């Protein structure tokens, strides 16, 4: 991997009853790490020295963990990735994520297993910037997810999603901001990627995936401005003009990033969507960098 670069694998899921949710991000070259950002400012930045598994549990037993670790905590091959005491393993049909982390800011154990069962796999990646240094791969836009946690004691299943991003430079080098969402449709899923690059407006991707693995691009509908967060992070999405969109719940509200659940109207359907808004100018601000260690502790060797 390039110095200053990154790879991550992202999973999200919402329970069938709408009461619970989870996101998991396995990061090599942890893009939101203040320690990695500091090394890049000094002219270095080995991504393998900044790795973490971010787990956020919403609803019952809400917890959040993201401990950054050094390269000696990583073991990997083509189907297996270990980051400290946690791991991800792909057996050809199911991605099994074994979690053993400590939540912050109040230390609590976060332990259990999450299984992602794709209905089909998608092997194409999409360029996000004009220089071709950042790519997004929607590995399994349609999936079933089983959550079995011991600590906290939580068990549920629901619709889910799996993707991957990779880049040869820091996110903030190419982008000012983006809004992203994935919506579960009656048949399949729709993903919107709305990017603003440093060199001007970026691509607006609209892709519809069916459960069998087919993908069809669609023209992104009009922009809908959503209410800003308490940290004044701007949010927006795209949806059918006759239906609009609304924020059902804000799951994460940070100085530079927001994760939300939306009720939206897209491709003629009313759907529930997982949504994120990211402001890279805010992330780069020194005052934000000073706050991040409270959410992202660095493990001892």
Image (spheres, rainbow, N blue to C red):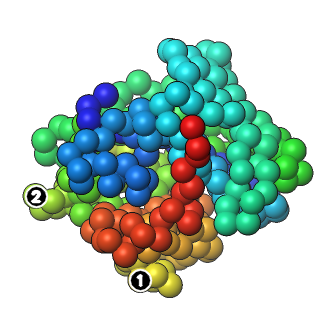
Q: Nearer the viewer, residue 197 or 283?
A: 283
For disc 2, the marked residue is 199
Residue 295's place in the image compared with 167, above or below, is: below
Whether tag 2 and tag 1 are in contact, CB under 8 A, the answer is: no
For disc 1, the marked residue is 232
Q: Residue furthest left?
A: 199
Q: Residue furthest front?
A: 301
Q: Residue at x 48, y 65 (%)?
A: 292
Q: Quadrant of residue 283?
A: bottom left
Residue 172's place in the image compared with 228, above or below, is: above
Q: Residue at x 47, y 71 (%)?
A: 291
Residue 254's place in the image compared with 221, above or below, is: below
Q: Residue at x 33, y 35 (%)?
A: 46
Q: Is residue 111 left or right of residue 245?
A: right
Q: Is residue 124 left or right of residue 25?
A: left
Q: Nearer the viewer, residue 140 or 223?
A: 140
Q: Quadrant of residue 41?
A: bottom left
- CA separation in Å, label 2 and label 1: 24 Å
Residue 120 in sight in this render: no
């Amino acid at each position: 991997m390039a110095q200053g670069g990154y790879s991550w694998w992202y999973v999200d899921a919402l329970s069938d009853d709408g009461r619970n949710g989870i996101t998991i991000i396995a990061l090599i070259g942890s893009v939101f790490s203040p320690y990695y950002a500091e090394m890049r400012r000094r002219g270095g930045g080995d991504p393998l020295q900044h790795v973490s598994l971010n787990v956020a549990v919403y609803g019952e037993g809400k917890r959040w963990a993201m401990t950054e670790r050094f390269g000696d905590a990583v073991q990997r091959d083509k189907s297996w990735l270990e980051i400290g005491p946690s791991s991800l393993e792909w057996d050809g049909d199911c991605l099994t994520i074994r979690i053993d982390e400590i939540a912050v800011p109040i230390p609590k154990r976060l332990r259990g297993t999450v299984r992602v069962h794709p209905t089909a796999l998608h092997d194409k990646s999409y360029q996000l910037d004009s220089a071709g240094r950042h790519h997004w791969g929607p590995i399994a836009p349609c999936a079933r997810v089983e959550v079995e946690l011991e600590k906290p004691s939580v068990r549920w299943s629901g619709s889910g999603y799996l993707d991957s991003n990779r880049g040869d430079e820091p996110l903030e080098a190419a982008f000012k901001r983006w809004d992203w969402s994935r919506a579960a449709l009656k048949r399949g899923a729709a993903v919107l990627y709305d990017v603003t690059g440093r060199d001007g407006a970026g691509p607006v991707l609209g892709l519809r995936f069916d459960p069998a693995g087919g993908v069809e691009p669609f023209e992104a509908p009009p922009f809908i401005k959503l209410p800003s967060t308490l940290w004044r992070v701007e949010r927006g999405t795209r949806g059918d003009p006759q239906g609009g969109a609304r924020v059902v719940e804000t799951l994460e509200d940070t100085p530079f990033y927001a994760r939300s659940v939306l009720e939206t109207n897209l491709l003629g359907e009313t759907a529930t969507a997982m949504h994120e808004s990211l402001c890279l100018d805010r992330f780069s601000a020194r005052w934000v960098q000073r706050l991040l260690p409270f959410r992202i502790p660095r493990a001892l060797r």
